[in-house]
Amino acid sequence: MSLRWEISNKVQAFKGWTRQRFGRVTGNRHQQATGKRGQAAGNLKQAGDKARNAFKR
């Protein structure tokens, strides 16, 4: 995939991680859950890209 997509997926995972940490610090469970979902989505997209690239080569 393109470098732009790879960076976008990493940014999404990082934003999820920061949101989860912020929720943990403030005690906001909704924020924590939203962060976990964002982080999981970004990581899943990265894994899909890696698998797709493995079969391309």
Image (cartoon, helix red, strand yellow):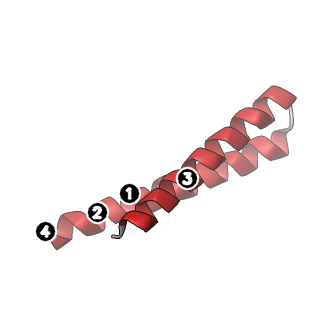
Badge nearest the viewer, 3 or 1: 3
In the picture of the structure, the residue carrying the numbered disc 2 is: 51
Q: Which quarter shows the C terminus?
A: bottom left
Circle 4 Cα neighbour tier, 10 Å, few/some/many (<14 / 14–19 / ≥20): few
Q: Quadrant of residue 48?
A: bottom left
Nearer the N terminus, badge 4 or badge 2? Answer: 2
Which residue type does callout 1 highlight? Ala
Q: Can residue 55 be seen in this view?
A: yes
Marks 3 and 2, how far apart at CA: 19 Å
Which residue type does callout 4 highlight? Arg
**What residue lies at 80% left-to-right and 45% top-to-bottom?**
31
Marks 2 and 1, how far apart at CA: 6 Å
In the picture of the structure, the residue carrying the numbered disc 4 is: 57
**What residue lies at 41% left-to-right and 60% top-to-bottom?**
6
**What residue lies at 25% left-to-right and 66% top-to-bottom?**
53
Which residue type does callout 2 highlight? Ala
Nearer the N terminus, badge 3 or badge 4? Answer: 3
In the picture of the structure, the residue carrying the numbered disc 1 is: 47
Marks 3 and 4, how far apart at CA: 26 Å
Badge nearest the viewer, 4 or 2: 4
Pointers 4 and 2 in contact (CB under 8 A)?
no
In the picture of the structure, the residue carrying the numbered disc 3 is: 11
Q: Is mark 1 on a helix, strand or loop?
A: helix
Circle 3 Cα neighbour tier, 10 Å, few/some/many (<14 / 14–19 / ≥20): some
Q: In which quarter of the image is residue 2?
A: bottom left
Q: Is mark 2 on a helix, strand or loop?
A: helix
Q: Quadrant of residue 28?
A: top right
Q: What element carries label 4?
A: loop
Nearer the N terminus, badge 3 or badge 2? Answer: 3
Q: Which quarter shows the N terminus?
A: bottom left
Viewed as shown, does residue 39 lie left or right of 4? right
Badge nearest the viewer, 3 or 4: 3
